[in-house]
Image (spheres, coloured by chain):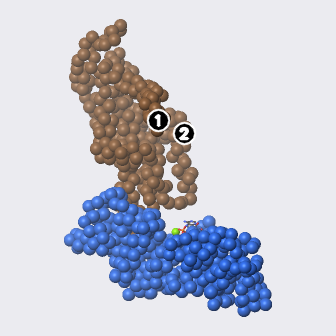
Amino acid sequence: MTSLTLKRARPDWSGIAFAVILTLVIIGPLVVVATWAFTEVWRYPNIIPQKFGFRFWGQTLGRPDVWNALMLSLKLSTVVTLLSALICLPAAYAFARMKFPGRDILFFSFLAGHAFPKFGLLVAIAAIFLQLNLIGTFWGVVLIQLVGTLMFMIWIPVAAFQAVDKRMEEAARDVGASPLRVFWSITLPQAGPTIFAAVLLSFVGTFYETEGAWLIGAPGIRTMPVLMISYINNQMVIQYGAVLSVLLWVPSFIALMFARRVIGGGAFARGFGG
Amino acid sequence: MSVLHIAEVTKTFSGGTHAVNSFSLDVADGELVCLLGPSGSGKSTLLRMVGGFEQPTSGRITIDGEDVTHLPPERRPTGMVFQSHALWTHMNVFKNLAFGLKLRRMPAAEIREKVEAVLELVGLAGYGDRMTNQLSGGQQQRVALARSLVLEPKILLLDEPFASLDQHLRERLREEVRDIQQRLGITTLFVTHGQDEALSMADRIVVMANGKTEQIGRPDVVYRDPKTPFVAGFIGTMNLVEGEVKNGHFARSDFSFPLSIADGPATLAIRPEALDLTVSETPKAKVHRVTDYGSHGLVDLDLADGTRLKSMVAHPDLFRTGQGVDLEPRAVAAYRNNQQIFRS
Ligand SMILES: Nc1ncnc2c1ncn2[C@@H]1O[C@H](COP(=O)(O)OP(=O)(O)OP(=O)(O)O)[C@@H](O)[C@H]1O
Ligand SMILES: [Mg+2]
């Protein structure tokens, strides 16, 4: 008993150190970027900016290309996520519950696609898209980003479906539900929180995706992150990029709040196997 | 009127396991039949074939004369209660019970009426709004039973429904289920590997081993007159003594017993309550341990070669460890080649 209290009284230094490092690494850059976004004058030796203000916000938000990019990004992410759910969820269910020839190889191929350097793969796909006249089109970008979501939208839901008690599904068949009805009324709600997490991840992931969007979308399609990169690369004014990146936090933030409200903290942790 | 007819059903799994082997059984209207057998004897597989969750490799299953062998579970008039209760945790109790009725497109008012009636039946009136994880293990199992009963199945299937509950609760639920089953007159197939469960509930018992029937009969008959040594050893406590018969006497070590059967090897089966002990100058066995249960006592004995026997005695205080005793079986059965060849 004494040893137990002693142990608890001693601070867990490695844990604290880990938390501090994590905070510095994650929060630090965010603070710097956020500060830049509200800075009007900040010259070298000073630790804090000389002049704060919203001047660059007005300038950035006044540009029509920013608004177009934002709308385009939202539209893209929504379409890609919906399509991905439509394709991947039934596929994930099949992987989790059914036995068919080639199942393991097919399943593994989803992982393999992500094991190789992505850019090389993208270039190869771009070459194909060029032939198909998909370069620079909305649907071209949808296609390429769809490929990017497969990983999340297959692997996580497969795990979620496998975690659903088979007896629950059988009990539903027993009271008269067709296989489709069982999926809709029992399996999907049971796997719900985890699948919701996967959908959220794929939405946010698509929103921030740049490589595919840039390679396939340029020059016609400019998503928000692509726009930000071009600002950072082409403009000497740091604030444009900073303002945009702060803007880009908005979807993450909304998504997280939404996630908490819909599934609650406990369920969220459970969804990730916590 | 609902009768279940299982004819020559065999199930071979893809790995080559013969889970059920040419099994036949008729269950009469309103009868409760217990499938009893050791782990892996094919009880669940058989039940799941009746419920439609496994396809028989061969054979036929009919309910009221209608062949259901190849119907999926949702089109069979059977209701299954699983060991793990398998309640839908994202629905409350009411929705769990109403789900099947909704699928049958029953009007909401009627559903409410039926669900309330069945909750009353299983002693859970007023629990409709609870989530399933707000119920005790026994209550969850009652809801699972109610979920099947509310659909008025022709055949009720139960797969070790009380296995995860404690002894006390198990006994109470056993009685409740038996009461409900008799009141509704519902034809029931019940899987268990607890023999006291089978003996106390069943109209008939099917003792299974290796996917086959060892014996079918009323519980008291199976207990009193086991037809194979396996059944003898499986139901109740039984002394099984392997020995040799010669000149009308069965012998094992110092113990011998007059037995008028042909010479050769035999297995003698004696219930502890049919084995009398007397303190003797010329002992055949030695007392190993005496256990006093209050109402009766149990004496463990060793024959000279170490064979362990049990005897139930009315006065355990008459015996002490190390004492020499003589044995007097009052009733025995003898088996040879897995067949009963003698019974007294
Ligand atoms: N899906 C399956 N695939 C392959 N073999 C199986 C399958 N289900 C059961 N078996 C095998 O069939 C045999 C009978 O299993 P079953 O579950 O019917 O036994 P049981 O009598 O219900 O046992 P228990 O009392 O442990 O529940 C076992 O050898 C088991 O390993
Ligand atoms: Mg079983």
Q: What is chain B's hue in the picture?
A: blue
**Pick the front one: B340 or B8:** B340
Q: What is chain A's hue in the picture?
A: brown
Query: Which residue does the numbered mark 2 point to in the structure image?
Result: A115
**Residue B70, image x and y in percent?**
48, 76
Which residue is located at x 55 percent, y 82 percent? B223
Considering every residue shown, the one lying at the far left of the view is B109
**Residue A201, image x and y in percent?**
39, 41
Query: Which residue does the numbered mark 1 point to in the structure image?
Result: A2
Q: Label 2: few (<14), some or many (≥20) within 10 Å?
A: few
**Host chain of mark 1:** A
Task: Determine whether the residue tagged by mark 1 lies in a helix, strand or loop.
Answer: helix
Which residue is located at x 27 percent, y 72 percent? B120
Which amino acid type is marked by label 2? Answer: Ala
Q: Are marks 1 and 2 in contact (CB under 8 Å)?
A: no
Which amino acid type is marked by label 1? Answer: Thr
